[in-house]
Image (spheres, rainbow, N blue to C red):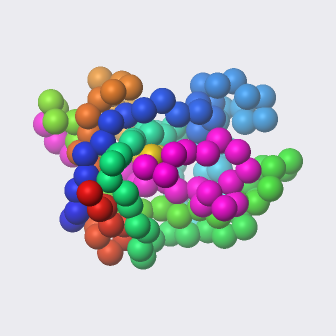
Amino acid sequence: MNQVAGNVVRGHGVASGKNGDPRFPGGTISMQLPFFAARGLDLSSYFPATINLSIAPAKFTPGKTRATFTALKWHPAEPAEDFSFFDCTFQLPEKAGEIHGLIYYPHPETKPEHFQTPDTLEILASRFVEGLEYGSRVLLSAPPEQILFQN
C-alpha cells in the first residue's frame, strides 16, 4: 500500500445533494448507483456522498482501476461520463481503525461541470464517518498498482 496525508475540503455538494440542485434530487451518487450496479459495481453499501480530500502538494497517477465505466449515461439531460474507481482505506489520526472506501474518479475530460482541483480526490466511504469535518486530517492508503501517490 502507498499512503498520503490529506485534508478534508469543501466540495460542490452535488454528490450528496446538499447543494439543492433540482437536476440532481438526492445527489448524483444516489442517481448513479443503479447505472454502476447494472455494469457490475454495487455501491449500495457505501454512504451516498463523497469526502473531498486535498492531498496537496502530493499528486496522484491512476493505474489499474478496480472498475472503469466509459460513456455512462446516468442522467437524461446531462452528457455521458467516464468514471473510474480505486480501492482505498483511510483513517483519521485521532481515531482508531481504518475505514474501507473507494476513490470515485469522474474523468475530468468527460465531466461537464463541478470540477475538482488536480490534487483533490473524492472518496466514497463504506459508512458515515462520525466527527469528520472540513479541515480534518486523513491518512489515505491505496494499492500502488491501482493509484500511485507522489509527494
Res 49 seen here? yes
Residue 49 at what x, y percent from top left?
51, 37
Vertical comparison of 25 with 82: above or below: above
Q: Nearer the viewer, residue 75 or 81?
A: 81
The quadrant in which the C terminus is found is bottom left
Left/right of residue 56 with respect to residue 78 in the rendered view: left
> Can you name the residue that lies furthest to the right here?
77
User: Which residue lies at the image location 73% right of the left edge and 28% below the top edge?
Assistant: 21
User: Which residue lies at the image location 16% right of the left edge and 36% below the top edge?
Assistant: 93
Left/right of residue 39 with respect to residue 101 in the rendered view: right
Quarter-of-image position of residue 20? top right
Look at the image and say whether residue 113 sits in the magenta stretch.
yes
Numbered disc total? 0
Left/right of residue 29 with respect to residue 149 in the rendered view: right
Look at the image and say whether residue 3 sits in the magenta stretch.
no
Q: Nearer the viewer, residue 60 or 124?
A: 60
Quarter-of-image position of residue 60? bottom left
Res 89 seen here? no
Q: Nearer the viewer, residue 96 or 147?
A: 147
The quadrant in which the N terminus is found is bottom left
Residue 5 at what x, y percent from top left?
25, 46
User: Which residue lies at the image location 36% right of the left edge and 50% below the top edge?
Assistant: 101
> Can you name the residue that lies furthest to the front here?
57
Residue 15 at what x, y percent from top left?
59, 38
User: Which residue lies at the image location 15% right of the left edge and 30% below the top edge?
Assistant: 94
Left/right of residue 39 with respect to residue 43 in the rendered view: right
Residue 48 at what x, y percent from top left?
52, 39
Magenta range: 96-119
Q: Nearer the viewer, residue 93 or 17?
A: 93
Vertical comparison of 62 with 139: above or below: below
Helix, strand or loop: magenta stretch: loop
